[in-house]
Amino acid sequence: MELLDAIEEFERPVDPRRGHNASPQHDFDFVERQVSYVQQKLRELWQRKRRNGADIPCIPFYWVFSKLLRLIEEYPDGLTEALVVTELAKLLKQKEAGDAGHEVGAPRKKRKIRDEEDMGDLLAEGEQEALQAKITGYRNHRLTVEMENAKDVIVHMYLHQRFRSCVDFLHNQLKYEAASVATFPFQTAREVVFTNAKLLERKAMDMGPVNGEDKRFQFTLLPTAFLTARLDEARPLDRRLLADSVSLSQVDQLVSGEQDPAAIQQVMLKAKVLDIGAIRPCQTPLYLRRQVILLGEVDQASTRIPAGATPNTQRMTQGLHLMVLWDDQVALSRLFRVGDTLSIFHPFVHVCDQHDSEILHILNEYSSQQRLAYYFEYGSATVLFCKPCRVTAVKNQTISVAGQGNREVEMPLSGLEDIKPGWHNFSLYAHVRSISVSHGVPLLAAFFYAYYDPKTNQLNAKMQQQPPPPLDRTIVSKYYLVVILQVYIASSKCLMTIEVTGENALAALRLLPGQSVYLDGLVAIDMRSKPVRRFRERRPMPPASASTSTAPVEFAFSTKAYNTPSSSGVVVLCSDWESIFGKQSLFSNSSKLTVVNTTPGLMNTTLDRSATGHEITTHALTMTEMTVTAAGWLIRNNSLEAPNFVIDTTCEKGHSTTCAHKNCLRPLEMMTREQTTSGPPKWKCSFCQEMFFGLTDTMQTFGELAVTLEDGRSQTSPLVVLCQGDTVERLLDLPAEDYVQLRLSEKRKTLTRVSGHAFRFVLSRCDPLHVLMPTTPSPSSPRRIETISTIHLRMDIVQPVDTFAAAHHLLQRL
């Protein structure tokens, strides 16, 4: 019998296409009922505080799930209902304020600035997110600005030399203003964005009564090189600035035409921000870190190859344009977003050769087929002007529904088939069907390169498409451990494949089939899409070094491994998005995988006591209180006849402890070595597909224990569950290393000592085990009879029952 057969046996048939509002409470498992309980308490709290009939805000189910799970992890000793509801209510208020702040046209809340410390805190926040202000005056190279998120304060800022030179150049050379005093682009009411500003001094000024106070404070800031002026096409001079800016293709012509280098450095360029990459360490010793900004034409028509173009004229136009920020310059990327239009005044045009090693690393990272003739840098005279990409509220709503998936729904997902390609940063609570581990290039790599291909190989999309180059390992090598999970939910009959890489792959190694997981920050893709297939169907990647490997490096899994019987081509990816794509990308929230069954504090934070019973439910995860009546070690039956296991209560047959791999906690196999070879032992982990020497990555752990449970309050038959690894240690209250040192009689006493005691358990499903069970002789039946029993459940958490607390909860129920 396979696990899916056990699922059908334990679960009642449920319509997988039921609506979100048709999900009854009794279909929830123990954890889902806790989430639903907290969700309802938040609604009731909102109603009590606002009795004027205001609409209750949307309280998303998976948002509550995530926040409750993080609280339980932070406080493993347990939380009260009042504390949980209070903390989540505060987070919900912050969430609503954040959502309102991101709405188009919504005013930002202003904070009171009273002293240098408050202003220092505000500037420190600006080092994480840029600060916005509006110019109220400009004189003697000093700006007077009104901060968008601060009130009753006047801020002066001395301009950096680069901005002074820009003002003089636009006034004297380009004659942007007829007036004798040059102010463009720093006229009154101009919006500016800046970061990395430092406080110089503070003065108190008597400005008359303002909001009941007699004084306002003025602060002076030191010059900062990281400032941009916002452009508005409603202003005539702004329109002229954009019109005077040259396109990327015109810069291509200037560089390829071998113009005077001084003339090239004095261009004014306009470009669209296609992507803001992650901050990565440099490969050469000149700099420590770098950040790549991918640029594209503002007018896509300008990138079209003219009719009758020859190969020589085609070569003048690059298909990839970069702006590289070095070291401290990465702060500049906070001042604009993907989709904004930049007008770059005097960018430093770095003409490079074909052997520029750092550029070669960048091209390899993005798997670009281009050869760069030049790239842009933030030079000593460079100034950025930004025309923000205006997004309407309607467009935001469309993106929210289509891309965010289930983030804003108040009920859990009704079916895995509802997950669509393009969903990003969504959450999922599911149960593990199977786990597979391999090493190689993940599907994530194909998705990464397919995402960047249209941004880094723009010309190839318009010319004859070339086959993709081999996938480079500079990014992929960090994600070479690949774990595939096939998961299901109770309300759906189909399976979903999830590829786990990065930090979460290490956590996934300790997963067991049947356990439940909560995943945040997921991305759904269509494996059958043309861009993904194009990279998956290429030839295998050559080895990184001929001295280290002679065989080509393959994909971790074949395409067939991602398909399920009910597969629609949708595969979910779980990875470290922030380090792959960067904080300012669409995939900025890294994934997090949590094994719910083994979460510390889960049993100590039981808010909905009705979910804790003394009977075994049909759910994939359940909590119960029962009494241990017997325990014995599972010994595999090597005979061909069923059952597969027998129970050893005498501790004479061994197999009580084993040597396990620290990463996955699975048993290890000691490999045989030649008699003439000396050295540390050689181990093989079949699950992780790894081989290693020595004892550094090994640990002593318990084997498999069959535990018989009974409930004295009902007439149900005894239940046999599987207990293994760390759970045996918690049940016996003894480490495996100490148990091995005991005498045989002491080992037996340790097993019999737990009999008769009541415990609370978190149970999950496991692969069915057929066990030969001995029955206890009785006066009416003195003969010892053996029966075959099937173990369907695994013990994930065990905790002794506090007698006083148990009596208190029993009285509450009565």
Image (tube, grey):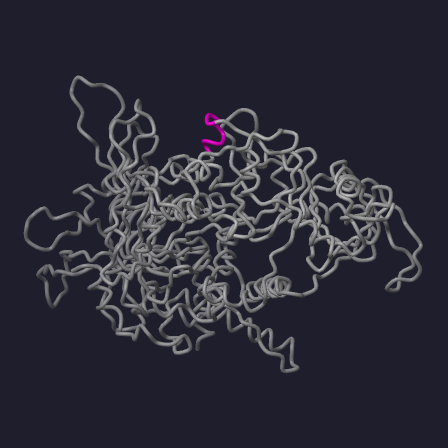
User: Quick one: 733 or 691, which is closer to the camera?
Assistant: 691
In percent of width and height, residue 758 lies at: 35, 61
Q: Residue at x 67, y 36 (%)?
A: 266
Q: Residue at x 62, y 34 (%)?
A: 264
Q: How many marks?
A: 0
Q: Residue at x 26, y 54 (%)?
A: 434
User: Quick one: 212 or 370, which is closer to the camera?
Assistant: 370
On the rendered image, what quadrant is the C terminus found in? bottom left
Q: Is residue 96 above or below residue 814?
A: above
Residue 659 visible in rendering: no
Q: Residue at x 32, y 34 (%)?
A: 698
Q: Which residues are magenta?
A: 354-361
In percent of width and height, residue 467 lies at: 32, 42
User: Is residue 372 a member of the stretch shown in magenta?
Assistant: no
Check the image and name the residue furthest to the bottom.
53
User: Quick one: 65 or 277, which is closer to the camera?
Assistant: 277
Q: What is the magenta segment's predominant secondary structure?
A: helix
Q: Is residue 107 above or below residue 691?
A: below
Q: Locate residue 806 relative to residue 618 in the image: left or right.
A: right
Q: Locate residue 180 relative to residue 230 in the image: left or right.
A: right
Q: Is residue 702 above or below residue 543?
A: below
Q: Is residue 718 above or below residue 728?
A: below
User: Is residue 355 a member of the stretch shown in magenta?
Assistant: yes
